[in-house]
Amino acid sequence: MSELDAQTSTRPPQAGVSSASIERTVEWVDTDAAGHQHNSAIMRWAESAEAELFRQLDLPEYFPSAPRVHQAINFRAKLWFGQRVTTTLWVQAMGGKSMTFGFEVVAHPMGEHDGGLAADGTFVTAYVPVGADASAPWPERFRAAIKAAA
């Protein structure tokens, strides 16, 4: 890993952090003309892990009120059709009106393809109540559920 990679790398969740993991198989639709994962697959898996986290927190009202305001992905290794991956997502920080998530996608070994970190990154959501045009503070129900899960 280069010095720049070490500086920009996200940190996996530790004890006391709200997190969720999912497993997926790289499907044909997840690949591009070069034969490895399309860049959009990584974010879809991160969003699936996000959905799992909010199912576990029993906060289904999160989704219509948490638009993305920023995302960054570090592509570190190729993933291939048929390869299994585990995506883990965690709450990195919760601000007054926004929440930052970290995530990583780890490949399982498959034939000649090694396992290991394939991608990591962050994204930020803002709380925008349904029907509102601007962000607002996160409701106490969200804060309490995330804190309790940690």
Image: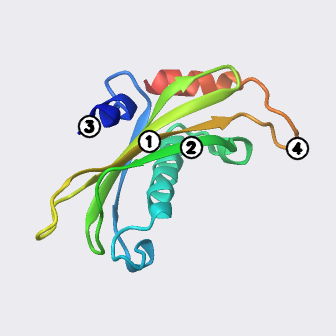
Q: Is residue 107 above or below residue 123?
A: below
Callout 1: SS: strand
* The label number, if any, that marks residue 2 in the structure image: 3
* Residue occupying image coordinates x 52% and y 24%: 93
Cα–Cα span, label 2 and label 4: 24 Å
Gap in angstroms between the C-alphas marked 1 and 4: 30 Å
- How many other residues sit within 10 Å of disc 3, few (<14), some (14-19) or many (≥20)? few
Disc 4 target residue: 131
Q: Specify the amino acid type for callout 3.
A: Ser
Q: Position of residue 61 (x, y in %)?
A: 69, 43
Q: Which of pointers 1 and 4 indicates the residue nearer the eye?
A: 1
Q: Give the image location of residue 147, x and y in percent.
A: 51, 21
Which numbered disc flags the more N-terminal residue, 4 or 3?
3
Q: Which residue is mark 2?
A: 71
Estimate the x, y position of residue 95 in percent, counting from the top left. 62, 21
Alpha carbon separation for disc pair 3 and 2: 22 Å
> Do the residues under discs 3 and 1 have CB atoms within 8 angstroms?
no
Residue mark closest to the camera, 2 vs 4: 2
Q: Nearer the viewer, mark 3 or mark 1?
A: 3
Which color mode does the image show? rainbow
Q: Is residue 59 left or right of residue 92?
A: right
Which badge, 3 or 2, is on the more N-terminal residue? 3
Query: Mark 4 against mark 3, which lies toward the viewer?
Result: 3
Q: Is residue 48 left or right of residue 120?
A: right
Q: Residue at x 40, y 74 (%)?
A: 31
Report the disc number at residue 121: 1
Q: Looking at the picture, how far across and down is residue 89, in whole percent?
A: 42, 41
Q: Is residue 19 left or right of residue 140?
A: left
Q: Amino acid at mark 1?
A: Gly
Q: Are marks 1 and 2 in contact (CB under 8 Å)?
A: yes
